[in-house]
Amino acid sequence: MVRLQRALAAAGVGSRRSCEDLIRAGRVTVDGVVAEIGMSVDPERQTVAVDGRPIRAEQKEYWLLNKAAGVVSTVSDPQGRETVVDCVPAGVRVYPVGRLDQFTTGLLLLTNDGELTHRLLHPRYGVDKEYRALVRGHIDDRDLRLLRDGVQLDDGRTAQASVRLVSRDERTTEVVMVIHEGRNRQIRRMIEAIGHGVLRLHRTRFDGLSDDGLGLGWARALTADEVARLRSEAGLD
């Protein structure tokens, strides 16, 4: 059972507020009876209608893409470049949860579950995102501490991060970083703030979902257990 406003919004009728207005206006019925604000419904078993026309909840789909370099994290692109939506064989229109810049590779979740998308992007829920970065130059221990403690960017100081050194020499350094913020190009900007540049950046993990067994450029549908875990952690039923 779900709130009627939520069922209407999930079916694409409108925002929750506009759906409330429809209910107040007496334009929504459940099994032929005029609906009331606050009631709950089972969209699978009951007939919900607006102005006498039954609505049908849109099937939710959840896809995990291992994005290749050059693919843009948008629904469409005026320059004709390949988009992340082009890479996913979904049966419905899906949207990326956040973005990876054009040259960053790795995991991106795409779905038409608007509530889950909102929760996963909200700082309150602290979704972990893990990146493997190949950095130009030798990053010393002081720089590693700066990255862990937070660095000052033009939009404020970053939160503490987990940073693990993989390898380094005089020319390059490889690190694994875990952050839970979602600022634009955050990893690249953090590394630039300590005086280095990123040669290669790959997101290896997104909120417990990893790229294990998923080739670059490939996508797969999430399992029911994975979807249930994501929704549970986001505080959704």
Image (cartoon, rainbow, N blue to C red):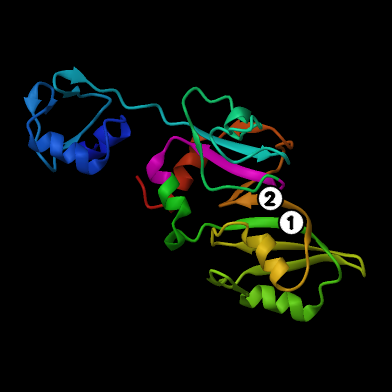
Q: Quadrant of the N terminus?
A: top left
Give the residue type at disc 2. Answer: Thr
Q: Earlier in the sequence, mark 1 or mark 2?
A: 1
Instruction: Give the CA separation, mark 1 to mark 2.
Output: 7 Å
What residue is drawn where x is 61% and y is 75%?
150
Q: Position of residue 188 (x, y in %)?
A: 69, 60
Q: Position of residue 162 (x, y in %)?
A: 65, 68
What residue is drawn where x is 46% and y is 61%?
123
What residue is drawn where x is 56% and y is 71%?
159
Q: Are marks 1 and 2 in contact (CB under 8 Å)?
A: yes
Which residue in the protein does label 2 denote? 204
Which residue in the protein does label 1 denote? 132
Residue in front for this viewpoint, 35 or 87:
87
Residue stretch rendered in magenta on the structure = 103-116
Element marked by disc 1:
strand
Q: Position of residue 112 (x, y in %)?
A: 44, 35
Vertical side of 46 occupied by 192: above or below: below
Give the residue type at disc 1. Answer: Arg
